[in-house]
Amino acid sequence: MSKMEVKTSLLDNMIGVGDMVLLEPLSEETFIGNLRKRFEHNEIYTYIGSVVISMNPYKSLPIYTADKVEEYRNRNFYELSPHIYALADEAYRSLRDQDKDQCILITGESGAGKTEASKLVMSYVAAVCGKGQEVNKVKEQLLQSNPVLEAFGNAKTVRNDNSSRFGKYMDIEFDFKGDPLGGVISNYLLEKSRVVKQPRGERNFHIFYQLLSGASEDTLKKLKLDRDFSKYNYLSLDSATVNGLDDAANFRTVRNAMQIVGFMEDEVQSVLELVAAVLKLGNIEFKPESRVNGFDESRVKDKNDLKEMCELLGIEQSVLERAFSFRTVEAKMEKVSTTLNVAQAYYARDALAKNLYSRMFSWLVTRINESIKAQSKSRKKVMGVLDIYGFEIFEDNSFEQFIINYCNEKLQQIFIELTLREEQEEYVREGIEWTNIEYFNNAVICDLIENNQNGILAMLDEECLRPGTVTDETFLDKLNTICAEHQHFESRLSKNSKFLTDHSLPHNCFRIQHYAGKVLYKVEGFVDKNNDLLYRDMSQAMYKANHSLMKLLFPEGNPAKVNLKRPPTAGFQFRASVGTLMKNLQTKNPNYIRCIKPNDKKAAQVFTDSLVCHQVRYLGLMENVRVRRAGYAFRQAYEPCLERYKMLCKQTWPHWKGPAREGVEVLLKDLEVPKDEFAYGRSKIFIRNPRTLFFLEERRKQCLEDLATLIQKIYRGWKCRTHFLLLKKSQVVVAAWYRRYAQQKKYQKIKSSSIVVQSFIRGWKARKILRELKYQKRCKEAVTTIAAYWHGTQARRELRRLKHEALSKRAVSVIWAGWQGTKARRELKQLKEEARRKHAVAVIWAYWLGLKVRREYRKFFRANAGKKIYAFTIQRIMQKYFLGLKNSMPSMSPIDKSWPARPYMFLEGTHQELRRIFHLWRCKKYRSQFTEEKKAIYEEKLEASEIFKDKKALYPCSVGQPFKGDYLEINKNPKYQKLNSVIDEKVLLADVVNKINRANGKGASRIFLLTKKHFVLADQKTGQVKASVPLPDLSSVSVSTQSDGFFALKLKEGTPSAAKGDFLLSSDRLIEIITKLHRSGTASAEREPINVDISDEFLVQFKQDQVCVKFIQAGPKNGNSVSCKRKNNRLLEVSVPSP
Ligand SMILES: Nc1ncnc2c1ncn2[C@@H]1O[C@H](COP(=O)(O)OP(=O)(O)O)[C@@H](O)[C@H]1O
Ligand SMILES: [Mg+2]
């Protein structure tokens, strides 16, 4: 729904009541209470019907934004909460659409917010009316006229920091489309007395301060001014600066505004010169100078300011100086010159200043009007905005207040007239009967002031024009006589004895009971101010000025146009202009804004009941409400009324087909609203009592709640249904997906099962065929076997027969057999060949397949993947190999020959090498545990092995025997004590051996001792040494190859030992003995090692004879023992049993 279509009402979200007409019950208390409540909620606007009450918030509220303008644009007055924009919009639309000239009447006390309100109205209208370059320029000029006029016409007063000291009425002119064309401003009575004197706590007009603070040094120099306020008599000092008012910035704003409005640069300059001149004027002081005739004549004290002022305005100094000392009175072509005393000189000076300023102000207005004047001559629609000074009651009230309050009386008058008239007209228009209402009409007060015969203003004029001495007192006397009877006039000296004793009423005052309260006026100055006298010498001096603007401002100074008639008095002028204004306003459709000041402190958020109550009273707001409610409190066009309440009746809800009026009738009948509570107008329904309206509102609220419930119900239903449908739809989707999934799974299961079944069947079939084939094969084999057997049987039978039949045929058989053999061999050969070929083919095929596969697979591997895999495999194999090896190591025994089998061919070398290394290591380990003795023993054993191994048959059985050496333990045995004494060396060996008799070959036991240097033979029983041979004498040792223990010790020829010949000995420990002998030889350095001859025949030297010892294998009959026999001189035979 667009924003425009939203149907709202003033009645929505109301704080208090938005329209006082609806206040129930209506009393002053509830009225003020309602204002307060709304004010506290920042609702500063409240309606009384179409009148807007505006409370000054004294703070900026966020309710004047562009958005707000849009919100109120083209909306009905009662559609939104009360706002000044609603009134402006209503006025503007009524002007544009209904061709009615409008006026906006803004009233209220000083500081109540009238000027602000007028600006808000203007800015709203500017915002909503037409757009375009030309139009925007006009708008801008109209809006910018405000700062200019405010600078020159506003001042700080005790009531308002920006109080308008002039009345302003501005007509804004529009064309038929509602686009602004221009405007006309009228100003009313500037409070010019302010120029020369300001009450305490107040300031002169803003422009003076703005100029001094904001102008550049250069400008100030040109204007011969000083930035210091204190240098100027006309500027009161006590409140020269105002909080929140930036004079310098405002000066720039004013300059800028003047430019926009269309002031020429030299015009601005002239205006500023006049402002400066007024300041200078204030500084001119006088001193008395005695004259011969005894009178005092005034003289200018310090001529500097005078000089400067004259320079500024181009006035001849002497002319002005003279004007301050003399006065020329012209009467009937006769000129009389009188001197001025000091007081008169001051009066003349101030009068000049006031006139200069006020005339300049009027000129400004004229000049602005010239700029904003509508260009086209076509018919215009007009919207007038009246912002006039508010009702004023000060401590001292003078002529100005009198005039201002008179003006306000007139406005109240017009308000009363127009409101009532409007109300009345509406009733007539709508055809409703009119009932009269009582209210206070201030026409009597207006009459008291403005009556042509005996009005106060008329009498003042009379006094002023009367010849003879005229003073304020004579004027008061006159009032006392003439107005005494008037019920709104009060004076101590009047004939009305009522006030004779009223001490609140001083003698030099009179009091008027204005509609807004009683005001006490001091008569002092009334006559002068009304006369507004400026000596002709002055105006002539001004006219003579070499300054174009000055000439314009003082036309009466023109000597060519000497007018002896008195100028009209101020009161007269004002009355006339107010009269014109009223006439003007009466022709227009009025819109009221009644401004109320919430407190006297210019403070936000403070609501002083008594003050507001006073304003409410004198503004007659209560009466206003009463008038409005007298007939019917509330009225509304039928359409919006029906639209708002149609839900209260079944026939009108939700749509009413017929005319709106009938709809409303049906509605009200249905609701049983009492007949006298409402009346049907032509276009509106009139409701007598607010109660009825609130009843309707209450019902509507209830109904809305029900409707909301209904809407909620329907919405919830809809939401649930949508949700359900969504769920249903989702369920279908989910189900579909699930079914699909289940079917897929089922299908896959069936498929895999069928494959299993199929494979089983295929297997079964294959096996069956295989079985069949095997069976067939067996059958074939059986047949063959049977056939073979049968053939065999046949053959054997045949053979037997043949054998039986004829041996002769054997040859044939042999041939046959031979032939058969040949055939078979040939066949075998052939078969072998074939088999070889087949194998070759298979091998080639396998290689080729391998190649193919490798080639195939090669593309799956990267170039070095193969290598990597190869390396990895090798590594794995090696690892496995080593680990395996570790687990199957043979024992640490060096003679253990076992070694695990080689797992891979390629490891052959490694395997053997490892075996070798292991063996070496094992041996080393083995050796390392030997002691020195043991080592010696083994060395001996080793030597024995070197000498005898594989050479002598006795050797193997000696391996297991340890070489003990000393078998006889000679040291311990007492038997061998003799021997011990002979041998002083360490015995290497001691044993019993057989000494073979050289002659017969028989043996005799002998002890055989071996030391490092000798070997000794001794008698076994006695221990007597038979022979001791030094080892160097021994040349060699001979032994047989057999298992006997014979050995010959051969001595070197020519040695003493050799005399008896060589020794032939026999011992079971032959191996040990010879080894030790050999060792002793090898150990000593000086001897050659003893030779050991091993042969079955060797020669020995027996004394002179050389005998050959021969070993033969004895036959079994010779027994198991070795026997030795001397065969002859030359031969000794030893028979050794065969092993
Ligand atoms: N609507 C408003 N919003 C904010 N401040 C306001 C409003 N109306 C008035 N004022 C304040 O009150 C002061 C006096 O208002 P003004 O219109 O000059 O009073 P009046 O013209 O009635 O003497 C203004 O200077 C301003 O500070
Ligand atoms: Mg004002």
Image (cartoon, rainbow, N blue to C red):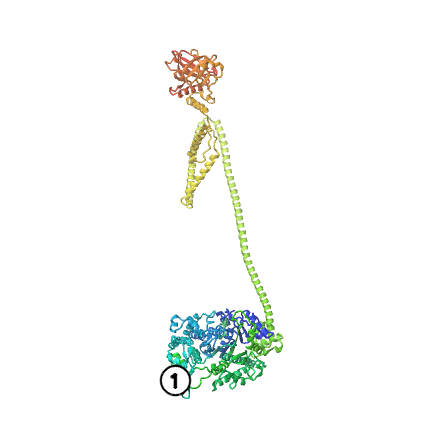
* Rendered position, 117 above or below 830: below
- Could you say which is closer to the camera, residue 65 or residue 871? 65
* Rendered position, 870 above or below 1090: below
x then y, percent, for residue 1065: 44, 15
Q: Secondary structure at mark 1?
A: helix
Amino acid under disc 1:
Pro
- Could you say which is closer to the camera, residue 942 or residue 296? 296
Assess disc 1: are there few (<14), some (14-19) or many (≥20) residues with their C-alpha within 10 Å of its C-alpha.
few
Q: Quadrant of residue 844?
A: top left
x then y, percent, for residue 75: 51, 73
- Could you say which is closer to the camera, residue 1099 or residue 533? 533
- Could you say which is closer to the camera, residue 813 or residue 549? 549
* Rendered position, 844 above or below 982: below
Q: Quadrant of residue 861?
A: top left
x then y, percent, for residue 784: 49, 36
Name the outermost residue toward the bottom. 332
The answer to whether one can see residue 234 in this image is yes
The answer to whether one can see residue 816 in this image is no
Residue beneath label 1, please? 559
